[in-house]
């Protein structure tokens, strides 16, 4: 493994070894801005690996402090993350003008997407 942290979690997730190996190879050497909003569904799709396995890998990375779970408000019109959502200090629905499409949106739970930030 390129990352010792990925090697470390293989014993915790032996059934997800393929996902760990593919993610390790894909993410190794990426710049910081390239690992700040990782989408598990996208990663599973481009690497042709199990989406549920990728999810388990990132949950384990979060539990070990190697990744951070982040939530974003998602603009359906632009199909892009609008801004980070702070569940501790904000309540849904949120009515806000979207900087991406310049329209007012009523962001609800279905407009919140989960992304992961790799911290290693």
Image (cartoon, rainbow, N blue to C red):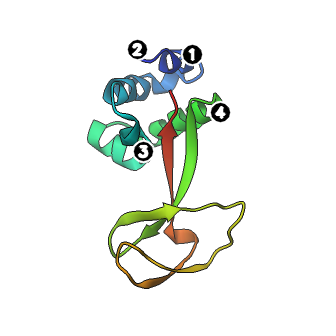
Residue 26, by quadrant, is top left
Mark 1, secondary structure of its residue = loop
Residue 26 as seen in the image, left or right of residue 95: left
> Marks 3 and 4: in contact by CB < 8 Å?
no
Labels 2, 1: front one: 2
Please tell me the numbered disc located at residue 11: 1
In the rendered image, the vertical position of residue 80 relative to residue 47, given as above or below: below
Residue in front for this viewpoint, 120 or 62: 120
Q: Residues within 10 Å of mark 3 (few under 14, many from 20)?
A: some
For the point 38% across and 41% down, which residue is it?
33
Mark 3, secondary structure of its residue = loop
Return the disc, 3 or 2, that comes first in the chain's sequence.
2
Return the disc, 1 or 3, that comes first in the chain's sequence.
1
Q: Position of residue 44 (x, y in %)?
A: 36, 41
The residue to which callout 4 is attached is 63
Q: Position of residue 8 (x, y in %)?
A: 55, 16
Q: Residues within 10 Å of mark 1 (few under 14, many from 20)?
A: few
In the rendered image, the vertical position of residue 32 relative to residue 10, given as above or below: below
> Marks 4 and 2: in contact by CB < 8 Å?
no
In three-dimensional space, the C-alpha distance between marks 4 and 3, rounded to whole angstroms, equals: 16 Å
Residue 106 as seen in the image, left or right of residue 44: right
Labels 1, 3: front one: 3
In three-dimensional space, the C-alpha distance between marks 2 and 4, rounded to whole angstroms, equals: 20 Å
Labels 1, 4: front one: 4
In three-dimensional space, the C-alpha distance between marks 1 and 3, rounded to whole angstroms, equals: 23 Å
Residue in front for this viewpoint, 71 or 19: 71
The residue to which callout 2 is attached is 1
Q: Position of residue 12 (x, y in %)?
A: 60, 21
């Amino acid at each position: 493994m390129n990352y010792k942290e990925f090697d470390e979690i293989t014993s915790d997730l032996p059934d997800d070894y393929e996902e760990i190996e593919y993610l390790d190879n894909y993410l190794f050497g990426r710049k910081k801005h390239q690992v700040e909003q990782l989408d598990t569904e996208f990663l599973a799709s481009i690497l042709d690996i199990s989406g549920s396995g990728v999810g388990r890998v990132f949950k384990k990375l979060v539990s070990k402090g190697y990744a951070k779970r982040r939530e974003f408000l998602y603009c359906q019109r632009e199909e892009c993350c609008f801004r980070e959502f702070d569940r501790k200090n904000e309540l849904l629905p949120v009515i806000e003008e979207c900087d991406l499409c310049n329209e007012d949106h009523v962001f609800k739970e279905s407009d919140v997407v989960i992304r992961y930030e790799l911290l290693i």
